[in-house]
Each structure stands twice: as structure tokens, then as C-alpha cells.
Image (cartoon, coloured by chain):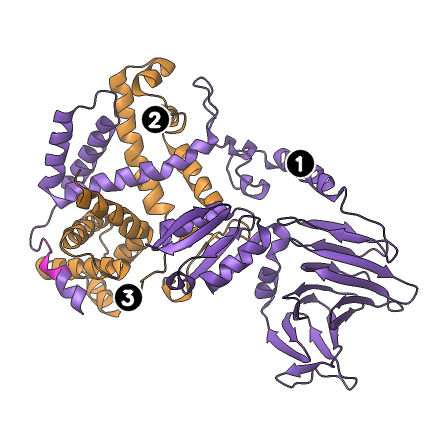
Chain colours: A purple, B orange
Amino acid sequence: MRWETIAKRFGTRGKIVSAADHERIDGAAADWFARRQSDEWAPQLQERLEHWLDESPLHRVAYLRIEHAWERAERLKVLATGSRREIPPPGSWARSPFFGSRLAGAFRGVEPRRHRRRAVLAAGVAAAACLAGVWMLSLQGPVYRTPVGGLERVSLEDGSTLTLNTDSAVRLEFSAHERGVKLERGEAFFEVAKDPGRPFVVETDGHRVVAVGTQFAVRREDDDGDIRVVVTEGTVRVEGDRGAKPVPPTAAATPDGSVLLPAGTIAHADGADVLLEKAEALAAQEALSWRRGVLVFHDLTLAQAAAEFNRYNRRQIVIGDPAVAELTIAGRFRANNVEAFARLLEKGYPIRIRSNGDDLVLESR
Amino acid sequence: MSEPQEALDCWFKREILAHEAMLLRYLSRVWHHKDDVADLRQETYARVYQAASVARPSAPRAFLFATAHNLMADRIRHERVVSIEAVGDIEALNVPMDGLSTEDLIGTREELRRLAEALDRLPTRCREVVWLRRVEGLSQREAAEALGISVKAIEQHMSKGARLLASYLLNEGGMGLDEVGDDRKEVRHSGKDRERG
């Protein structure tokens, strides 16, 4: 291979530097680095440093390694207290709002329980504040709504709970023989209390998703009535205005023209077609990771990932360059931290971020 | 520092140093004398840097591993005592060579956790100095006053601290492949890129 021959050409072949030499070089690089940070850095010193760096690529890479780690550590600044007297003891990070309550427990020597309770309390207060004004009574039944970036869990009178994703709205239409929920916008996850005499029905324009006692999520993909259903427990039935048939045709079809979805299914209903995707339990859980404010991507194009982020944030990511759209991405991300996502993109990909008003425009660099 | 030099240094940090944890695993699997791994690493880096100063490889990660491979092959040829396993492994090892744009993206919170853990591993005085200088942004003199030690001592702690941070952050924290657990696992590799083992 071409680059292999290049690598050979520039090798320091035959000249083997001992481990002790490396130790010495590493120490010298660190000393130079520390001196470079000192208050008395002078032009003559800069000259000498550059001379030392030029002496051998071994010198330079040793120095770059240390400089790189130091630059990375800049992020620790978010933990600053602004006081030169109080240096937080090791392992005290659980108190920091920058670590989630779960993560805080990962640190040794901390008492996660107390901090966790505090974090939960804070989350509860925030949720209560959000919910005020969300709950509205109307002639047709109560409506629950979340703003962009919102995430709400609501207990229903029958013992079921619903979790509303970002920018979503449901209207409850409970009657004596049916527990109706109209998904007017966005996505919701349902944990349905068993009540055989009163099916739980989630309705969108064009589809009805029927459950007796189970856990599943319904998401409106667009205004044309396409939906995505993720079933994590039990079985749900999908009915369509124009009928419903499974693709590929399988036993999931029922004689009355609906489609049965067992647990571990991700289904996309587009008109009468219900596209079935057998999902591993993990994939189904990941499709619902939004309930914890997390987005999980597996080899998504950047365009798809951006569209997903845009559901959760007022600040929109705009693809400013077709070359950028096709890059693929994988990872777990905080849904509401679009700035951090953009910074990571800039670090890891040949991408430049430009602010345009409130938008973040991605361009190749 | 001249402009192209600076660009090269940035490239090196971004495209090469990012793979240190995986490089170390590769080196230590092939090379059975553990004491040599650190200098194989530095030697590999030096070769990559030198080559890149002439022409940047278009697939940096693949280039890095090819360089490491060649270096070890050279050493095996030159050294008298060669472990049989080393020779066998080097032929059998299939290093993924298609690492074009599959950068590892680390969640910011995860990165912060790693940094805090690396900081916590520093010796006490060293940690205090790094904290005041890097986090609180104090000058050398201010840090010396705050801790009641000499300016020279601050510089020595800085040297040690920066060096230890580099080894904690780049060697071990680097990839987090071994991490398990749901919310903590914020590092993912795009399919093909995943290390075999």
C-alpha cells in the first residue's frame, strides 16, 4: 500500500532509542512545557524551546502530547469555584451540576444517595414548573403539551402513565368503554394499566394503535399521518383508516385488516403499509432513550442526526454543505445540548460551525 | 511558531493523539516486552510526525497503525531475541485500515468525568497546583502565594502534573472501550472501527 511505503521511507530505521531515553525526553518535554506556562517566559527561551523541538521529532511529539492533554483539561474550568482558598477535595464532583446524578455515583468515595435525592428534587421542581400551564381543560378532555426540549411524565386516572417527548401534545378522551388518547403532535410513551374491558387507544390522523396492558411509544413522523410505533412490552394492534397490512406480509396480519405488533417491534406505518422491523430489546430501548433526555445514534448521516436534534432545540442545526450531510455519526448525546454536539462535530470531523442568527450552520472545512 | 508548523501540530493532536489508547492496546498485544511499549509509541509518533511534515496522510488512523506495524517489524528484524508470539501475531493481526472519518466522539459529560478523575489521581500538592493554574486560572506567582510555596516549586509541580495528566488522559481514559453500564457509556465506535479482540 502506498502509505506503507511512505511510512518506511521516513522511519528512523536501525536507530533504536532506549526506554531510559524516552523517560528523559518525556521529562524534558514536561519541564519545557511548565516553563512555557510560567510568568517569566521570554523570547530567548522561546528560541531555545524551538531549537529543542527541532532537534528531533521525538522531542516534538513528546511535547505535543503534554500540550494536548493540558488543552483538553481546559474543560475542567467549568468546575472552577472562583476561590483560591477552596480547592475541592478529590471525588467531590458529585455536587457539581455538570455531572448527572447517575454519573456522580461513579466517583469513588462520594455519597451518591444524598446528592441523588437533591438532583431528583431539583428535577421535580423543574417538572412542576413546566407542567403548570400545560394542563388545560377543554370540552373534549384535558390536553398535555410540552415545549421544544420538554419532557414530561404524567399519571393518568386509570393508573397508566404517559411520557411526552419534546414539542408534543396529547388530548385525553376517556370514556366508559375506551381510553382514548389523541396524539396531536410529536411523540409519547405509554405504560398502560391492564383493563380488558376498556382498551387503551392512541389515535393519530389515519391510525389507531390499540393496547390492553402494555408499554409502547407512538411518534408522528410528519403531518401526512406517518407514524412510528415502538413496543417494549405486551402486544399492540395498529389499525388504519385505509386498512393496515404488514410489510413484508406475515402472520402479523389479522382477519379484520389490522396488524399485530409484539414486544420488541419497531413499526413504521405509512398509509396502509405497516413496515415491521424486528428490534433487539436494546434497539427498542435506545429508540426510547429520549425518556432520559438522551439521543442514541448508530451510523446515522449527519443530516438525519441534525433533524433529530432539531426536534429538541429552538437552536436549529442547518446543513450548509451537501458534503457534510453524508458524513456518518454514532454516539450518545444529551438531546438538549446542541452546542456541545456542534463542538464535538467540529473537533472530530472536517466541519466548521458558523452561527447564523440562532442557527448553527455546518460547513466543510 | 510558524503557521504551517502550528497547523501540523494541531493536525497531529487531533488525528493521531486521539487514538493513543487503541494504539497502546495494539502495541502491547503484539509486543510482549511491556517495558518497550512506551518507547514504541513515541517512536511511532515521531515517524508519523516526520512523514506528515512532508505530506499529510489522507487516512491518519490507518497510517498510524501501519507505521506502528512497520516499526515493530523493523525491530523484530534487528533484535536478536524475538518472541515467537510476536512474529506470529504481527502477521495475524488484522488492524482496521479504513479509518477515514470515524472519529470517536466522546460525550462532553463523559469527557469531563474523565478529566476530573485524572485530576483526582494526581498527588495532592500536584493536584492543587494544577487546579489553581489550569482551573482557577491563577498565575504562577498567585498560585505560589495561595499555597505558600516557591514559584520554582509551582513550576516543578506543573511539569509533573502536566506529564501525569497526559499519561492518565491519553493512555487509559482514551477510548473507554471497557466501560459498561447504560448512562455512563457515552463512547461509541462506528461499526467497522471497533477493535477486534
Tags 3 and 2 on a common chain: yes
Q: Secondary structure beneath disc 3?
A: loop
User: CA gap, disc 2 to disc 1?
Assistant: 35 Å
Which residue type carries mark 1? Ala
User: CA gap, disc 1 to disc 3?
Assistant: 48 Å
Residue under pointer 1:
A122
Q: Secondary structure beneath disc 1?
A: helix
Q: Quadrant of the N terminus of chain B?
A: top left
Chain under disc 1:
A
Camera-side mark, 3 or 2: 3
Q: Is residue A10 magenta?
A: yes
Residue A250 relative to residue B179: left or right: right
Choose top left, top right, bottom left or bottom right for residue A308: bottom right
Query: Residue extending furthest left?
Result: A14
Which residue type carries mark 2? Cys
List x then y, in percent, for residue A144. 76, 52
Chain under disc 3:
B
Camera-side mark, 1 or 3: 1
Chain under disc 2:
B
